[in-house]
Image (spheres, rainbow, N blue to C red):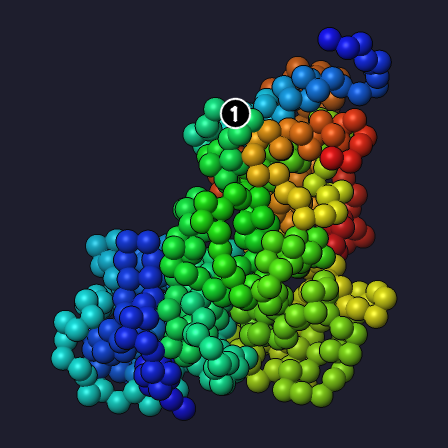
Amino acid sequence: MASLRARIAAARPDPGARLAAPGASLGLGDLIRSGGFGAELAGRSVLVLTATQIGAAQALVELDGRARRLVLCPPGAPAEHLPHVIAEAGVEAVATDRPEQLPAHLGLPVHALRPPGAAAATSAADDLATEWLMFTSGTTGAPKLVIHKLDGLTAALSPTAPAGPRPVWGTFYDIRRFGGLQALLRALTGGCAMALSEASSPIADRLAWFARFGVSHLTGTPSHWRLLLMTAQSEPLDLAYLRLSGEIADQAVLDQLGAMFPKARIVHAYASTEAGVGFEVDDGLEGFPEDFVGRDGPVELKVVDGSLRIRSPRAASGYAGPTALTDEAGFIDSGDMVELREGRWRFVGRRGGVINVGGLKVHPEEVEAVLNRHPAVRMSRVQARRSPITGSVVSAEVALDDPQAANSPELQARLRASILDHCRAALPPHKTPVSLRFVAGMQMTAAGKLERANA
Amino acid sequence: MQETAIDTRAPASDDIRSVVVAAIEATAQAQEKALQPLVDDLLLAESGLDSLCFAIIVAQLEDELGVDPFSTLNDAFFPVTFGEFVGLYEAAARGGAS
């Protein structure tokens, strides 16, 4: 199997093709020439922990085919999870673009990326089938690691480039997560330029950057696209291809994008870190056709107990660690609940009840744990509330310790402010409840667990 | 000024505007965002608020006003300016389509 470096070279990128973020860029030619540390890390398990996306891309190209494993750390991964990740993946070294910013006490050798061309071209072999480990959220706080290889990650990409000018890719995702990595691999293996952007940048700035860069093919979640629809574009994007994945693409967002980009091909993809790219839908309708389930082909779908199951050569080979990824027949239970309505499968939500706020996962239990730490709170239940902006937001019901509060609007107002302040201090904004309702009590299951709408 | 019949069931548009402004200002403060002055031609994308802020504002306004005009948007119209955003709520409160 050819390494990522070899595949970029084989795509013969245009001399000017660059991987670019505002204020920084790297030519695709430099990306494959920059013999930095591949040889030093040959055969090792390496944690890729970078401050920048371009740094991550450089490390991926350096390491694929040489390292035994590369473990791609997403931005903002809590430092306290790293020891678990290092142990689970047998990490032996860290590759980074900013050694000075690494968390202290990782206890591993640190290899700093060097500027492209700083080292002579390495003669290290690059024919190892490197394992790519990506983070995915488990049911508890610590991430699980799913194991892919480059051939599986790129299996969904069409092998031949269509005629005409090469696409210029752009993505709202971070390339250190599955959706963004897909876009990066599409661009690199096609020899295409690509514009990256930071989630922390204002949407108007990101859109202006994509327009200036000449992005023709843009990927993001439905939430990203809804945000785009709400944004006046100073320089209009001229898109030929729009791709939505990572959340349910509803008919409204597909219709609105179709009206804004009448000439573009609009695709919504079903993909996950575990199952890889399952399928694409480009008929402009939400959900997917009835006959996708049970049809022949490399990716097989079935629905059991309402949840979508996938068997696919693009799927991860497993988790690092003891958890099984597939059932005995090799199917992954996606946990995505679907319903057949009018000849079309529609996504109805997550079985596990994870709340998806604009593509960010929120476990109700972790918010409840914070709420329950407030001295006035006896019990809480957190659930998704539908949002036209982010798909869902977090709402909470709280039973107070003092039942007298029910009769005092003043006390309720004071407690509401105090509880929400407490949440804001302990949780990132997307996990903080948007609405808080005081209730007298909550339903319990026979097993003594809090009853949940999604249970 | 022409006389108009006053429907006492629906809040006057000044009231809607002040409720919307209050929700936006409270959210900006809670989320520690630097809010631009709320003039009608302010672009929402340049208001200083992110998509989570708008999600919070829309949820709060649904609680306070009992309407979520976004859920009934059925064509390719999304408010781009603050004035359009307020207008959407004023239209929804009147029970009419914008």
Q: Residue at x 42, y 67 (%)?
A: A168
Residue type, numbered disc 1: Leu
* Closer to the camera in the image, B75 or A82: B75
The percent position of residue A295, horizontal first and vertical second, equals 74, 84
* Closer to the camera in the image, A18 or B49: A18
The percent position of residue A412, horizontal first and vertical second, equals 66, 21
Q: Which residue is mark 1?
A: B38
Give the quadrant of residue B87: top right
Q: Residue at x 38, y 89 (%)?
A: A2
- As drawn, is A152 to the left or to the right of A18? right
The percent position of residue A379, horizontal first and vertical second, equals 67, 37
Res. A139 in view: no
Farthest residue to the front: give it.
B2
Give the quadrant of residue A351: bottom right
From what the image shows, is residue A179 above or below residue A386? below
Please, which chain is the residue tagged with disc 1 on? B
Res. A240 in view: yes
Name the quarter where the C terminus of chain B is drawn.
Answer: top right
Q: Residue at x 32, y 71 (%)?
A: A17
The percent position of residue A19, horizontal first and vertical second, equals 34, 66
**SS assignment at label 1:** loop
